[in-house]
Amino acid sequence: MIEFQHVYKTYETHSDENVALQDISLKINEGEFVFVRGHSGAGKSTFLKLMLMEERPDKGRGKIFLNGQDLTKLRRRKIPYMRRKLGVVFQDFRLIPTMTVYENVAFAMRVTNISNKVIRNRVPYVLSLVGLEDKMDRLPDELSGGEQQRVAVARALAHGPKVIIADEPTGNIDPELSMDIMQLFEAINKVHITVVVVTHEHELVNSLAARYGNRVITLAHGRIAADTADPEVARRYLANGGQPVPELSYSV
Amino acid sequence: MRFSSFIYLFGQGLHNMRANRMMTFASMGVLTVCMLLIGTAFLLGVNIDYMVDYLGDQNFVVAYLDEGVTEEDRAAVEAQIGAMPGVAGITYNSPEAVLQEYSGMLGQYTNLQEVFANDNPFRANYQVTLTDVSQMEAVVARLEGLGHIYRVNAPLAVQQLFLSLQKVITYGSYGLVAVLGLVSIVVINNTIRITVFARRREIGIMKLVGATNGFIRFPFFVEGTASGLLSAVIASGIVCGGYYYLAQWYAAHPTNLTQLFGGELVPLEQVWYLVVAAFVAFGFILCGIGTATSIRKHLNV
Ligand SMILES: Nc1ncnc2c1ncn2[C@@H]1O[C@H](COP(=O)(O)OP(=O)(O)OP(=O)(O)O)[C@@H](O)[C@H]1O
Ligand SMILES: [Mg+2]
């Protein structure tokens, strides 16, 4: 479903070059639930942005496949159609400030050419999943950070994507609600939707991964430091002089 | 695209127009002024054409004969004039006929026929009708080259003034349309560029959730063309209304000069649809171009 082959990503800034990801190779199968964790600046968001084609890998260094399609060769005009297969929760929410909560969610569906009738039924439903059905007519600025984040979650689910990609979807939400949101993702995963969740919250990851048997990938300094689906990865990483990752002590 | 999407995007465009009403207002102002100038130039051109045509209908010159020309010489001259290229016809006015005409005009004051009974001061003349006005100069030269011709009267100066005025105004209005068209494109382009820039984050988000360029561009297109069409409506109203009253005033205040050119302007009924059609096309096409050229950059997400 999703495959990275030796992908490198370097950001060019006005002063220097910033290597965000190096030699990333992995495969995520359809229907998998994957946690991606790592220290701040490890490259987690960059990893997700590459899948969405918000960023592109360094020229000639690596390939990314989605459903067998090479994204590095995808024509510009085709990108929107590829994106519609994904549901993305952005780390900074990316809600449209001039649209109400309802419109923000509805917009992602309109873009996908879903009929008005379906939109009218579905938007309140997905908003109720994240507990916001009574705030549909507010603007994003009139919501708390956690509420905005939940709108972002609802928008990612609304158009029924095959893959959900969430960048710190619970970063602004209290632990109890965080658990609810994660459970929501687990439930979605049950109907064979691939879920990739980036998170800082080790305890949450540990308890959920233990309970549901989710795969956990750990990034460190732009490299994959560990992958519960492939214990070899961690050994190779350390053998190549990688820094040990302190919180690797979860059990599967 | 679904019809409901079409309706939605159309509504978004109108909504954005209202949301950016200051910008909309400013760009519509500039557009309207451009159209007013173009419309004025056009109507001026139309009326100059009309006057030149009117003068063209008066396309004859008068050739006066020397005194004491014999009947044979006169017949020869008449044959020569009749054979000239550019001459459509000739009418002979004998001194007696001229005297009669003038005395008819002054009939109630004095009897010219009696006053000048033995000493007619008028000269025999030919009224020479031309095939078309542009021949006037050549025909006058040929007539002056003939023998027994005392003088040739032709409204040459006025004729030439108007012909060159017509040319200047025609080229001037082409130039004006080109310049103002460019100005309008730049203004629309800039307006949309500013609103696009203000909303670039929003556009980026739309693209990331899978919107195509067309889906994003459409509301801007609606916004641009709607301001273009609205400007066209406003400009049409002002130009046609203004022209209507001007034409009325012009006809109601005749002077010697205006009488010379027919005493009235081209009636509004003959030009209003041209003005409106030109404005609508102008607004629609230029705004379309202005929109298409301004969004592209921010769509590359
Ligand atoms: N647009 C950018 N321009 C330049 N450098 C960038 C850019 N985005 C990210 N980086 C750099 O790339 C590296 C990886 O960033 P990334 O956002 O992927 O980290 P992250 O793991 O998501 O961190 P966090 O947990 O804090 O969100 C960091 O060193 C960061 O400074
Ligand atoms: Mg991040």
Image (tube, coloured by chain):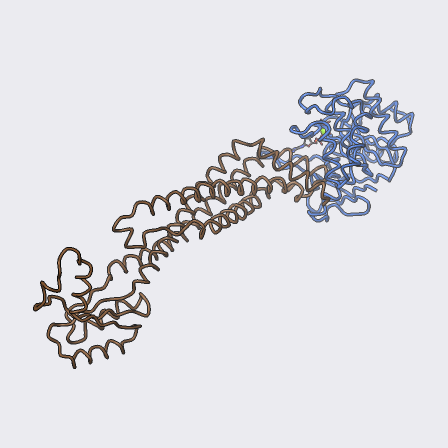
Chain colours: A blue, B brown
Query: Which of B207 and B264 lies nearest the eye of the viewer?
Result: B264
The image position of residue B210, as x and y in percent, is: 72, 40
Horizontal side of residue A25 vs B297, given as left or right:
right
Query: Which of A3 and B211 lies nearest the eye of the viewer?
Result: B211
Which of the image's four quarters has the N terminus of chain A?
A: top right
Which of the image's four quarters has the C terminus of chain A?
A: top right
Indicate the quadrant of ligand 2 in the picture. Answer: top right
Q: Residue at x 31, y 66 (%)?
A: B134
The image position of residue A22, as x and y in percent, is: 73, 38
Query: Which of B272 and B78 lies nearest the eye of the viewer?
Result: B78
Compared to residue B276, the image places residue A99 above or below, namely: above
Compared to residue A39, the image places residue B244 above or below, namely: below
Q: Which residue appears farthest toward the left when viewing the image?
A: B118
The image position of residue A68, as x and y in percent, is: 81, 47
The image position of residue B25, as x and y in percent, is: 50, 34
Compared to residue B24, the image places residue A146 above or below, namely: above
Compared to residue A30, the image places residue B78 above or below, namely: below
Q: Where on the picture, by quarter, is residue A23?
A: top right
Number of on-image labels: 0
Horizontal side of residue A233 vs A81, given as left or right:
right
Q: Residue at x 39, y 53 (%)?
A: B46
Query: Which of B43 and A81 lies nearest the eye of the viewer?
Result: B43
Q: Where on the picture, by quarter, is residue B145?
A: bottom left
Q: Residue at x 82, y 32 (%)?
A: A217
